[in-house]
């Protein structure tokens, strides 16, 4: 491959490098979850129908799924760091444009339909270019992490999503400024991304590049012609599991704000703090799973795959039958804990299922299935308008099906860290010898 990032994993991941990747991922997660929390306020303030509001993510999700494998291959060829810069730039530009569009809508400079179309296009920039960073983050960590430590590393990285879910909705109401109104959070999240863009560019070390041997050039040509990684029998069960989990989590997150508004029977602006509080409890539960329980009990991907959907099903059931706001928050927190187990479960499990040569490709496949799920958000919203409990009952049913699947699927049953293969051990030894001669 083009650089040592595509070769065997290093024995340790530099703490500074992980910190930069982690906080860059947090910056994106804060912005995305902050946007999710204020979308109900934006939609109802601009007189955009609820189903159209959640569909703003649909085009972006399709572009994310289509572009993720391309960006993953590009990270093998050009390095992980350049792709992280592309992703952060795409996020920053998308948030800025969406903020300008929302500001125009608040001043009634265009009709609601025109505002919706412009928001759809502005968000699509994130789907096309923002997708570059996630495969690069995951592949960078897989490159530098031994198999035995990968589940813990992936869980720590997944914690960035949890922090984003906690901090984004909590901060968003404070960024509603007097002049720009509810467009303020979008401009602020773009500014945070700009800061992390500079940090990555200035301080993140790229893996040292080395010349390609003829056999590596031939292998790379073969890889380009291979079938998509999500169709690989080693990875397909994890991709399917991850797609359903991500669909359920996205549906619950995007429906939650509307449920809180309707459950309280107040105006969107009056409910903004309750929405942020509910999301904060969910994020705390997810972080408890990823940074506490997983590490305390040294849980394996196989265990995470099972416990994740079991907790997710129970949490969605609680939300579906909730008589009041506080029960909704409790159910959402329990479901979020389940998602906190499940995400590192299928991410680490898919990484462990393939060798070091395929780490970027599997990262691209997982990023794609994590993104495409938002396409179904409008359908869940239509279901919600028909019956407020229906989306959560549907989520519960899907989670129970996945629980059965986690027991019957052979790749999911065998999703445990295995001993390092002879090939990996040999390549790791060669790399350490090369580094010693620099």
Image (cartoon, rainbow, N blue to C red):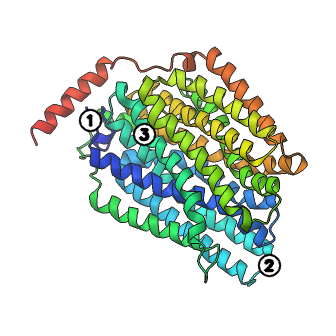
Question: Rounded to the nearest whole Å, what is the CA distance between mark 3 and mark 1?
Answer: 15 Å
Disc on the earlier residue, 2 or 3: 2
- Report x, y in % for residue 185: 57, 69
252 to the left or right of 32: right
Question: Going 9% across and 38% down the picture, which residue do you hit?
Answer: 437
Specify the farthest residue to the right.
Answer: 386
Residue at numbered disc 3: 156
Question: Going 79% across and 40% down the picture, which residue do you hit?
Answer: 322
Question: Rounded to the nearest whole Å, what is the CA distance between mark 2 and mark 3?
Answer: 44 Å
Q: Which mark is residue 111?
A: 2
The C terminus lies in which quarter of the figure? top left
Point out the frontmost of discs 3 and 1. Answer: 3
Disc on the earlier residue, 2 or 1: 1
Placement of 162 over or under 97, stated as above or below: above
Residue 226 visible in rendering = no
Question: Going 40% across and 59% down the picture, which residue do you hit?
Answer: 85
């Amino acid at each position: 491959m083009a650089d040592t990032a595509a070769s065997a994993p290093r024995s340790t991941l530099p703490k500074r490098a992980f910190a930069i990747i982690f906080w860059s991922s947090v910056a994106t997660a804060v912005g995305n979850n902050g946007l999710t929390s204020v979308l109900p306020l934006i939609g109802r303030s601009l007189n955009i129908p609820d189903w159209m509001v959640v569909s703003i993510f649909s085009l972006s999700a399709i572009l994310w799924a289509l572009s993720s494998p391309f960006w993953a291959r590009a990270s093998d060829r050009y390095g992980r760091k350049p792709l992280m810069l592309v992703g952060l730039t795409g996020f920053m530009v998308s948030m800025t444009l969406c903020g300008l569009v929302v500001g125009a809508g608040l001043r009634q400079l265009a009709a609601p339909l025109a505002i919706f179309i412009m928001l759809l296009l502005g968000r699509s920039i994130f789907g096309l270019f923002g997708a570059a960073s996630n495969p690069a983050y995951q592949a960078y960590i897989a490159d530098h992490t031994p198999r035995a430590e990968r589940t813990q590393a992936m869980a720590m990285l997944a914690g960035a999503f949890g922090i984003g879910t906690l901090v984004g909705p909590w901060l968003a109401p404070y960024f509603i400024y007097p002049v720009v109104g509810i467009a303020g959070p979008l401009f602020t999240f773009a500014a945070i991304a700009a800061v992390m863009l500079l940090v990555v560019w200035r301080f993140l070390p790229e893996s040292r590049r080395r010349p390609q041997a003829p056999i590596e050039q031939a292998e790379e040509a073969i890889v380009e012609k291979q079938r998509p990684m999500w169709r690989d029998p080693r990875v397909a069960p994890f991709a399917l599991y991850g797609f359903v989990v991500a669909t359920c989590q996205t549906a619950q997150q995007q429906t939650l704000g509307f449920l809180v508004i309707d459950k309280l029977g107040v105006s969107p602006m009056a409910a903004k703090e309750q929405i942020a509080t509910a999301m904060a409890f969910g994020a705390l539960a997810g972080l408890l799973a990823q940074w506490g329980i997983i590490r305390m009990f040294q849980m394996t991907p196989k265990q995470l795959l099972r416990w994740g959907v079991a907790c997710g099903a129970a949490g969605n059931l609680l939300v579906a039958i909730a008589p009041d706001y506080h029960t909704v928050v409790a159910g959402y927190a329990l479901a979020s804990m389940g998602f906190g187990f499940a995400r590192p479960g299928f991410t680490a499990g898919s990484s462990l299922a393939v060798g070091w040569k395929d780490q970027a490709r599997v990262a691209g496949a997982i990023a794609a299935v994590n993104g495409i799920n938002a396409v179904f958000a409008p359908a869940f919203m239509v279901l919600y308008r028909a019956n407020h409990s229906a989306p959560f009952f549907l989520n519960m049913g899907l989670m129970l099906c996945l629980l059965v699947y986690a027991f019957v699927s052979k790749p999911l049953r065998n999703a445990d860290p295995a001993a390092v293969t002879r090939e990996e051990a040999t390549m790791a030894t060669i790399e350490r010898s090369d580094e010693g001669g620099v």
